[in-house]
Amino acid sequence: MKLQSTLATHVKDAVKKIYDVEIDNLEFQPTRKDFEGDITLVTFPMLRQLKTNPVKLGEEIGNYLAENVTEVSGFNVVKGFLNIVLSNAYFLDFFNEMKNREDFGIIPAAEDAQGIMVEYSSPNTNKPLHLGHIRNILLGFSVAEILSAAGNKSYKTQIINDRGIHICKSMLAWERFGNGETPESTGLKGDKLVGNYYVKFDQEYKKEISELMETKGVTEEAAKAEAPILVEAKQMLLKWEAGDPEVVALWEKMNQWVYNGFEKTYDALGVDFDKNYYESDTYLLGKDVVNQGLEKGVFYKKEDGSVWIDLTEEGLDEKIVLRSDGTAVYMTQDIGTAIQRVKDFDINGMVYTVGNEQDYHFKVLFLILKKLGFDWADYLYHLSYGMVDLPSGKMKSREGTVVDADDLIAEMTETARNISEELGKLDGYTEVEKEELYRMIGLGALKYYILKVDPKKRILFNPEESVDFQGNTGPFIQYTYARIQSIIRKADFDFKKQVADGYEFHEKERSLIKQIQLYPETIQLAAENHSPALIANYTYDLVKEFNSFYQNVTILGTEDITEKTLRVQLANSVGNVIKSSFGLLGIQVPERM
């Protein structure tokens, strides 16, 4: 913040002049609402270098600032806190500089800006996206947008898990029980159709286990291993790995059904990717790196030929990176994929949006890449997040009881429709406009409810609570934005004119401008912490401040044209910041509600 650095320079000058001491660090914070002032200098830490009492120190610095700094119009000292009052001229200069900027707070990426790749979604191609994916997708997309707004070049990617036994299970079940049905013949989205056969496989597998236990008297463990349908799925995987034309053709066909289905869900959520990586392309990457690591002594080989890394000195354990038969494990693939991404894009950092059950995996991955000598390994970040529960409990996908992402989006739209109709505020809307508004409110509610929570915390998602038009919700903020647009439409005069020097601010106007001032540093803080929650909760605080302003001052009804001009400009600026901050969360805002 420019003001803070200006004040810091003058405070250091004051201390040097009065005490002949070079002071190191200064601590500023917003003034508490129950005290007069706009920004507060905490004097206690300064006492380590200065032999005086905090009140005397505050008074002396305060007097110096009032006499020498044009932005300061007064001060008061409460114990060790110097509360600085800023001048009306300072607020007017700041406001005039930012009021017409729709990109206020956003830093465009410079030519040499840091490139950061954000991985999110990364689904399996054997089932539709579900509620757990939604938190992942919304977090990853938003963090990429925030990193870009903070001045970085961000790239969005996903690694699609399109190979392995779980994919063959869906393929085999479709081959056995599908009778050639397709998304077109059933009217189902491709990911739903393929997901149905993943569930079907599991049902048949359980039947075969029971039959084997009853007819042959084998143990459950043996029955699970010997079930013919699983044996056949494993054979199918071997055929795929050998490039069998029929199996590969079926795999390509069913995966394409799934991709088409995913695309519709991504479109509905309003997210996108710069590049997709596919596990079928990357699963062999990393093997060469393991051999290089063996030569460097980073890895070691056991008697059975498997390759490991010993991380016990770092407080972790031994980790396998290549099986004895020479096949890769997930860790090997992740090593190879990370290296490939740095080759493909001009990046020196990566963010992996993956649930907290993988915390250990990423500690190991990042440490291995460091030991292999990659400088960029210092700039890898695991965006770890907690589970999402519904009031009815956790989700499972094998048994078909999963909370489907498409169904949830539809339910959110329906919930928004029911609540909006109860409130009865949509006179004069066409049916098309109403449907678009319900979708915007429903999705805004879903996204905001999930993103306002710190990523590391577990969420209990309540659809009805999320669509409430009061409190810390997406619809409440959307409604405030629409209210502001209504004020702008009703302003039947030229409110673009510059307000002249000498304007005396109402305390509610000052408070609102101070809240707007926090937006640029909130973006930087959210980027540093990979936390959309900081943006969400900042926006809620801004909206609360605006509603207090709206209730306490007359905007369009005031007789004073200068007051009216500034207040409409101020409302418009708040609207711009809401639209910008919600854009970083991937949430749209309606012009009318």
Image (cartoon, grey):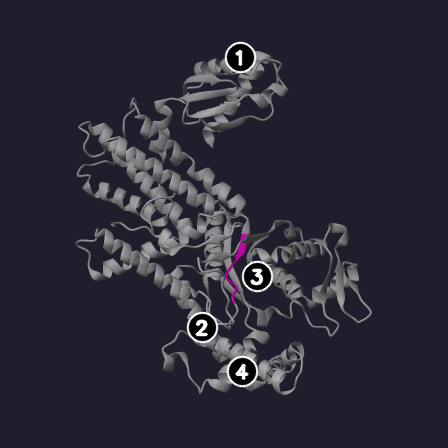
Q: Position of residue 393 (x, y in %)?
A: 48, 60
User: Which residue bears the numbered disc 1?
Assistant: 56
Residue occupying the point 65% across, 61% down = 335
User: Which residue bears the numbered disc 4?
Assistant: 172
Mark on residue 191? 2
Q: Nearer the viewer, mark 4 or mark 1?
A: 4
**Residue 105 belongs to the span the image colors magenta:** no
Tell me how far mark 1 sits from mark 3, CA to CA. 60 Å
Q: Secondary structure at mark 1?
A: helix
Tell me how far mark 2 sits from mark 3, CA to CA. 29 Å
Q: Residues within 10 Å of mark 2 (few under 14, many from 20)?
A: many
Check disc 3 and give the amino acid type.
Asp
Q: Is residue 163 above or below residue 4?
A: below
Residue occupying the point 44% across, 68% down = 262
Q: Quadrant of residue 566?
A: top left
Tell me how far mark 4 sits from mark 3, CA to CA. 35 Å
Magenta-highlighted residues: 116-123
Q: Position of residue 87 (x, y in %)?
A: 37, 22
Check disc 2 and give the amino acid type.
Asp
Between 517 and 224, the residue placed more toward the observer is 224
Q: Secondary structure at mark 3?
A: helix
